[in-house]
Image (tube, rainbow, N blue to C red):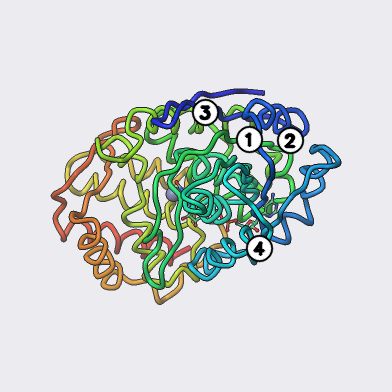
């Protein structure tokens, strides 16, 4: 078991990674948090079916648990679900002295965290991530929110949890595509900060092929927590580095209306585009893209890039992103573990990098 401290303005909190932690740690942390009169749990039906008893059995038999369960999928990370969540908590008498548990992947964590942040002007919450993606990335750092039609993560805030408990035994039920989805964000941490992560077995066919899962998750969480501790509100440029591959990735996701790619798949392709763009712009030496390709292509094995993905749509989408964010910034690598922020990347370079990678993937 490993524990990592995150420093935040609302106070420090712990990320705990290990096996069978609900029984060992959730109960202890709830006790340490002091008096609370109710527990609310936000999740999906399938996760409750697969792993819900692990939570319920670890709590006191008399503990009342208000469960808000909503259908899975990014399309449900929206205002309608949020309103149902508020209603459910209100109807069940959940008050300001309650603690909310988010129990699921990034969709549950983002929506449940925002529910906690805004219900009755904010109640305490604990993240219990159940996907690799959520354990290595989304559960840490307090970015919570929901999507509006055509605008991902358009509504949200920064609201740090009281703790993150990553009980890795629950990952056994993830399918291979979800494992690979998470591994793309893992690779991101390797490219940005720690080459040891890149020694992983990327040809994996299942969770068991990962060399040391606990170490890998803890290392990514530690790297993210360091960034969050120094740039909690994403104003200093350090947290922006974590968007490596995401400018291209978001364009892939939104130009296909979030129907085609899992987030990690889009980020994997986005990082290949960023690596090629860095080479074309003369920021990185040739070879950077090839290294990305060797690591990331296995994560995309069997994934056919559809014809609707095209460079014009992606360029349009980046322009829209630029308007929303007030500038279009790219995270590029000068070399492995040497990231930098680039505000002025020529359209020709962006276009060529996108086209080359699309062609490469279509020739799969
Ligand atoms: N807040 C942040 O900093 C941040 C960072 C990265 C991503 N995100 C968000 O995270 C979301 C993506 O997260 P995700 O990839 O975890 O997707 P997800 O939450 O949709 O989960 C993927 C699928 O796995 C299922 N699942 C979850 N746990 C399972 C388990 N243990 N066994 C079997 N199936 C399980 C879910 O029901 C779902 O169908 C996006 O909305 C993205 O915007 C947020
Ligand atoms: Zn991401």
| First in sequence: mark 3 vs mark 4 | 3
Q: Secondary structure at mark 4?
A: helix
Q: CA distance from mark 1 to mark 3?
A: 11 Å
Which residue is tagged 1?
165
Which residue is tagged 3?
13
- Residue at position x 64%, y 54% in the image: 42
Q: Is mark 3 within 8 Å of ligand 1?
A: no
Q: Secondary structure at mark 1?
A: strand
Answer whether labels 2 and 1 touch (C-beta < 8 Å): yes
Answer whether labels 4 and 1 touch (C-beta < 8 Å): no
Q: CA distance from mark 4 to mark 1?
A: 28 Å
Which residue is tagged 4?
91
Q: Which mark is residue 22?
A: 2
Q: Which mark is residue 223?
A: none
| First in sequence: mark 2 vs mark 4 | 2
Q: Secondary structure at mark 2?
A: helix
| First in sequence: mark 2 vs mark 3 | 3
Q: CA distance from mark 3 to mark 4?
A: 30 Å
């Amino acid at each position: 078991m490993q524990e990592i401290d995150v420093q935040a303005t609302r106070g420090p909190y712990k990320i705990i990674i290990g096996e069978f932690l609900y029984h060992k740690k959730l109960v202890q942390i709830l006790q340490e948090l002091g008096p609370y009169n109710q527990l609310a749990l936000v999740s999906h039906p399938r996760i409750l079916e697969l792993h819900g008893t692990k939570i319920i059995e670890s709590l006191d038999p008399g503990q009342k648990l208000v469960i808000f369960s909503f259908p899975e999928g990014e399309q449900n990370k929206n205002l309608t679900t949020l309103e149902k969540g508020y209603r459910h908590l209100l109807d069940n008498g959940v008050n300001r002295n309650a603690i909310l548990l988010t129990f699921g992947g990034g969709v549950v964590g983002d929506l449940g965290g925002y529910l906690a942040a805004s219900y009755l002007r904010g109640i305490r919450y604990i993240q219990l991530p159940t996907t690799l993606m959520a354990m290595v990335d989304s559960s840490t750092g307090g970015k919570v929110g929901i999507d509006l039609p055509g605008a991902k993560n358009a509504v949200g805030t920064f609201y740090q949890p009281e703790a993150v408990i990553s009980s890795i035994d629950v990952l056994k039920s993830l399918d291979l595509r979800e494992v690979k989805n998470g591994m793309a964000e893992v690779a991101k941490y390797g490219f940005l900060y720690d080459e040891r992560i890149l020694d992983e077995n990327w040809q994996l066919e299942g969770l068991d092929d990962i060399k040391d899962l606990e170490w890998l998750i803890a290392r990514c969480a530690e790297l993210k927590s360091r960034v969050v501790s120094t740039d909690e509100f994403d104003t200093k440029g350090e947290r922006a580095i974590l968007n490596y591959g995401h400018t291209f990735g978001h364009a892939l996701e939104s130009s296909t209306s979030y129907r085609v790619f899992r987030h990690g798949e889009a980020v994997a392709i986005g990082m290949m585009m960023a690596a090629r763009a860095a080479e074309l712009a003369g920021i990185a030496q040739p070879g950077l893209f090839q290294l990305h390709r060797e690591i990331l292509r296995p994560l995309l094995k069997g994934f056919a890039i559809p014809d609707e993905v095209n460079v014009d749509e992606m360029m349009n989408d980046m322009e829209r992103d630029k308007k929303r964010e007030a500038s279009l910034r790219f995270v590029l690598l000068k070399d492995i573990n040497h990231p930098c922020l680039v505000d002025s990347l020529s359209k020709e370079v962006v276009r060529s990098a996108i086209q080359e990678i699309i062609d490469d993937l279509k020739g799969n």
